[in-house]
Amino acid sequence: MKIFKKTMVFILAAVMVFTEPAVVCEAGAAAPNTISFEKGAAKTALSTYWASDSKPAKKLRKYVKKVTNKKDKENYIPPKDRIAVFDMDGTLTCETYFTYYDTMMFIEYCLTDHPEKVSEALKKEARSIQPGYSAGEELARNFAKAYAGMTVSELYDYAVKFGKKKTDSFSNMRYIDGFYQPMVELVKYLYKNDFTIYVVSGTERTTTRAIIANSPIKNYVTPNHVIGTEFEVKVKGNETTSSNMDYKYADGDELVFTGGFIQKNLNANKSIYIEREIGQRPVLAFGNSGSDTSMMNYAIDDRNPYPSMAFMIIADDDVREWGTANWSEKSAEYKAMGYVPISMKNDFAQIYKKKIKKAKVQYKAA
């Protein structure tokens, strides 16, 4: 009898050692009937696509552990206040094919897909865009003009359709495939720790929503958590009135872009629109350029009632990516501003899906 009991204890111990831990479901998901595990799943958070010695990843893990620990009275953040904001282009996604998604979409719309719908001036503008072109407010105004007369749904659908086209800057990459795998892993990690994720982009809002809804982070960012550049929208048939205040929407009405421009969501506008649409300071902010610094500073402002951090992606990888940034120079600059710099070259174990490779030439002239 003693031998039997010892044998059973040994068997149970073996089962406990070799059996995988129970599956933890994401918020709102039903528990599976059977336990299943992703092959090769990482044992440590942020270790599948992040370098094993990544200091930024370590700091993120330490921060999340601290602010989600109810016993840590000084640093604990209630779930409702765990807000993380992300820039999109260059932070979550590629912006080097050869420039931003929305700019490439504008070029394609004007010169290939619908040249009959745009003016000669807009076509000329589209032809003039070259690698290194600065996508400022004037260009965004031209985007608004190009899509005048389109319904909100039509622009959304076109952004999705465009995303299925292949880029010349990388092999085996459609435009929608440009999400950085380490950042996708990070968004999922924060979501599982009860953070609310917002995407705060310089890209027009409808286009940003279309990109996010067809991306690897679609389950973690809802449409109402997308903040972007704003084009004017009115009810079709009332585009020329100064305001739609006196018009009542009726069944079957269409919302259309008028060609008017409201604001470019960069620099201070990011902090302003975060305040207007979220109503409180984020505790985490992620960006990749100077136009994101207002958003970062707004998060780490001393008046934030909670512990906060800001991280800046530096495009210093010229082997797997088209990065040209000088790590020593940029990292020192960002550290001085209170941000944690992230090196694409050294902190990202893998940038894109394995099939995607940098092309020999970034830009093929028409």
Image (tube, grey):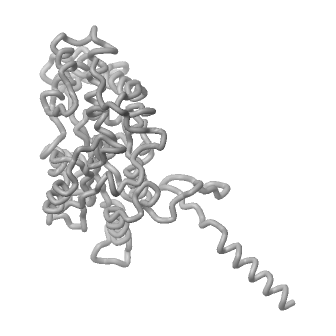
Residue for point 39% across, 58% down: 190
Vertical order, 249 against 73 (above or below): above
Quarter of the image with the N terminus in it: bottom right
Residue that protrudes farthest toward the right in the picture: 1
> Can the viewer see residue 298?
no
Residue that protrudes farthest toward the bottom in the picture: 2
Location of residue 250 by image quarter? top left
Q: x%, y% of residue 11? A: 76, 77
Residue for point 29% across, 38% down: 95
Residue that protrudes farthest toward the front in the picture: 360
Q: x%, y% of residue 334? A: 17, 57
Residue for point 84% across, 85% down: 4
Relative to 34, 105 lies left or right = left
Relative to 248, 185 lies left or right = right
Vertical order, 343 against 144 (above or below): below
Q: x%, y% of residue 92? A: 33, 45
Vertical order, 142 against 336 (above or below): above
Residue for point 34% across, 15% down: 113
Location of residue 109 by image quarter? top left
| Nearer-the-camera pick, 304 or 183 | 183
Relative to 124, 254 lies left or right = right
How many labels were placed on the picture?
0
| Nearer-the-camera pick, 360 or 144 | 360
| Nearer-the-camera pick, 342 or 291 | 342
Quarter of the image with the C terminus in it: top left
Location of residue 363 by image quarter? top left
> Can the viewer see residue 81?
yes
Q: x%, y% of residue 31? A: 59, 56
